[in-house]
Image (cartoon, rainbow, N blue to C red):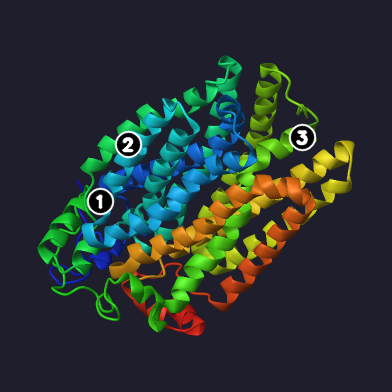
């Protein structure tokens, strides 16, 4: 069997240097890329599963909402609480749990979050009151909030720098896959279970898969990058060796620097409040504000698209008189939502292909502008009738879904987990996700109320403005991280836009 040799055997290096190493054949030929190990592939698949569950549960809630509202006899404000509960949980979980990965490790929180998710998902199926359902959805959100920073870090700290963008976004794409699956499962369940308990069966379909993923997460290795940043050189060495087991084997021997990479300690260390010091303030703004602006429109459109689409198709009964009317409305909304949400997957596929080539910043700006154009087209449908009305809504929403996943929905997530050094990466990514979900929670709670008060047109105009602002903020606080070694992230965060471009 052919063998490969270490390019710098027995020379102390950082963990990321070993992960990024290109193997060399005995005749001196260097391989064109770093092959993934089985452990790296397992980590990636388990992280992707977490994103799938997020899309599945959050977007399926929109399909199930009419049934939940009828069963528990709740009004518009309480309907808003149902949709906002999981998002509020994400907000709290991202900061309250996600940031703990800087203290207790990536793997530990990766497991804890899945245990919490599975427990509350199972409990939600048996809820007997509106209050208990909101509590369970909040619990699901806690787990999903923890997953935002943890899933990103568990991937990015264990894979080569040159493929970090496509692999992180490849896993993130499963949020869109989950959204489509949520709409599809919702539709399938409604065709089989024609009663108010159909929403319980929707959530029940994810319980067993969640259990499988929970158990599998016990078998991955801890992030060697995180262990090294904490000064645990021996444990980091063991973790790196386990991560990099491959055939033929390289590196033959892992010898890490005794100290963590420069910039990992000091300047606030791993303190949460160091995010707001001058050194990292620009990174914090870039990671959080555009994500907040993006979530305003993404969750508003994503959660309530079934209702809007059912009305546009002319299949929605304006006054629900029977169970058949209710099921018909939910079914038509699920069908239309599934059709448009497919564009999320197409958009993320392009993001995966282009993130490491065009860069995060350029795609995020282009995406924000494209979202604004799509929403503008959709707003023109307000005065239209018949086929033109449906066409404008579909074209506008489809363009929006494509551009948001090509740009801000994908790139904000990617940047938030990259622009901070390892010692505060969990805190930074967690804060950014939590800040973003303030916008998502507000949108989920207020959207059904504002839809009745100010109408569709003014809501869409507001979302257009937020998309334009997202592009502006991204440009002024830009930090390009495409292909940059994790050991240099601290320099990017502390530098100017021109300096970060030079490093990248």
Disc 2 is placed on an element classified as helix
Q: Position of residue 211 (x, y in %)?
A: 31, 32
Q: Earlier in the sequence, mark 2 or mark 1?
A: 1
Residue 496, can we see it?
A: yes
The answer to whether 52 is drawn above or below residue 184 in the figure is below
Determine whether, in the image, residue 409 is placed left or right of residue 205.
right
Determine whether, in the image, residue 7 is placed left or right of residue 342.
left
Q: Position of residue 431 (x, y in %)?
A: 41, 63
Residue occupied by mark 3: 311
> How many numbered markers are drawn?
3
Circle number at residue 107 = 1
Mark 2 vs mark 3, foreground winner is: 3
Whole-number angstrom distance, CA of label 1 to CA of label 3: 45 Å
Residue occupied by mark 2: 213
Q: Residue at x 50, y 56 (%)?
A: 437
Whole-number angstrom distance, CA of label 2 to CA of label 3: 38 Å
Q: Earlier in the sequence, mark 1 or mark 3?
A: 1
Report the front residue among 79 and 221. 79
The answer to whether 136 is drawn above or below residue 396 in the figure is above
Q: Residue at x 48, y 37 (%)?
A: 57
Q: Position of residue 363 (x, y in %)?
A: 58, 63
Disc 1 is placed on an element classified as helix
């Amino acid at each position: 069997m052919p063998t490969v040799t270490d390019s710098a055997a027995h020379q102390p290096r950082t963990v990321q240097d070993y992960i990024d190493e290109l193997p060399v054949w005995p005749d001196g030929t260097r391989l064109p890329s770093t092959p993934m190990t089985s452990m790296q592939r397992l980590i990636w698949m388990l992280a992707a599963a977490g994103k799938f569950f997020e899309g599945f549960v959050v977007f399926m809630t929109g399909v199930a909402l009419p049934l939940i509202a009828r069963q528990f006899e709740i009004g518009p404000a309480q309907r808003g609480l149902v949709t906002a509960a999981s998002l509020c949980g994400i907000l709290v979980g991202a900061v309250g749990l996600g940031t703990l990965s800087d203290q207790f490790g990536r793997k530990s929180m990766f497991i804890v979050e899945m245990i919490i998710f599975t427990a509350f998902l199972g409990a939600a199926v048996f809820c007997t009151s509106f209050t208990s359902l909101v509590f369970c959805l909040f619990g699901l959100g806690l787990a999903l909030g923890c997953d935002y920073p943890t899933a990103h870090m568990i991937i990015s700290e264990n894979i080569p720098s040159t493929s970090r963008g496509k692999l992180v976004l490849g896993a993130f794409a499963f949020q869109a896959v989950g959204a489509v699956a949520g709409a599809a499962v919702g539709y399938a369940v409604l065709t089989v279970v024609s009663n108010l308990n159909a929403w319980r069966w929707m959530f029940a379909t994810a319980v067993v898969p969640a259990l499988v993923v929970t158990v599998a997460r016990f078998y991955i290795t801890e992030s060697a990058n995180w262990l090294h940043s904490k000064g645990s050189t021996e444990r980091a060495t063991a973790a790196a060796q386990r991560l990099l087991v491959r055939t033929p084997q390289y590196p033959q021997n892992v010898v890490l620097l005794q100290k963590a990479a420069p910039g990992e300690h000091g300047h606030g260390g791993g303190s949460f409040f160091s995010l707001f010091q001058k050194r990292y303030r620009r990174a914090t703004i870039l990671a959080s504000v555009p994500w907040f602006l993006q979530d305003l429109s993404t969750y508003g459109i994503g959660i309530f698209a079934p209702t809007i689409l059912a009305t546009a198709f002319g299949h929605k009964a304006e006054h629900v008189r029977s169970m058949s009317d209710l099921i018909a409305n939910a079914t038509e909304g699920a069908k239309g939502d599934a059709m448009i949400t497919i564009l999320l997957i197409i958009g993320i596929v392009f993001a995966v292909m282009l993130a490491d080539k065009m860069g995060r910043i350029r795609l995020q700006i282009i995406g924000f502008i494209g979202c604004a154009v799509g929403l503008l087209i959709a707003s023109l449908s307000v005065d239209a009738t018949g086929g033109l009305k449906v066409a404008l809504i579909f074209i506008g929403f489809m363009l929006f879904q494509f551009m948001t996943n090509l740009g801000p929905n994908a790139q904000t997530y990617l940047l938030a987990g990259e622009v901070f050094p390892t010692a505060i990466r969990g805190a930074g990514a967690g804060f950014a996700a939590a800040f973003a979900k303030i916008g998502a929670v507000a949108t989920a709670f207020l959207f059904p109320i504002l839809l009745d008060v100010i109408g569709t047109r003014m809501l869409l105009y507001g979302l257009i403005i937020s998309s334009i602002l997202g592009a502006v903020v991204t440009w002024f606080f830009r930090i390009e991280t495409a292909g940059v070694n994790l050991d240099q992230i601290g320099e990017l965060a502390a530098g100017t836009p021109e300096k970060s471009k030079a490093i990248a």
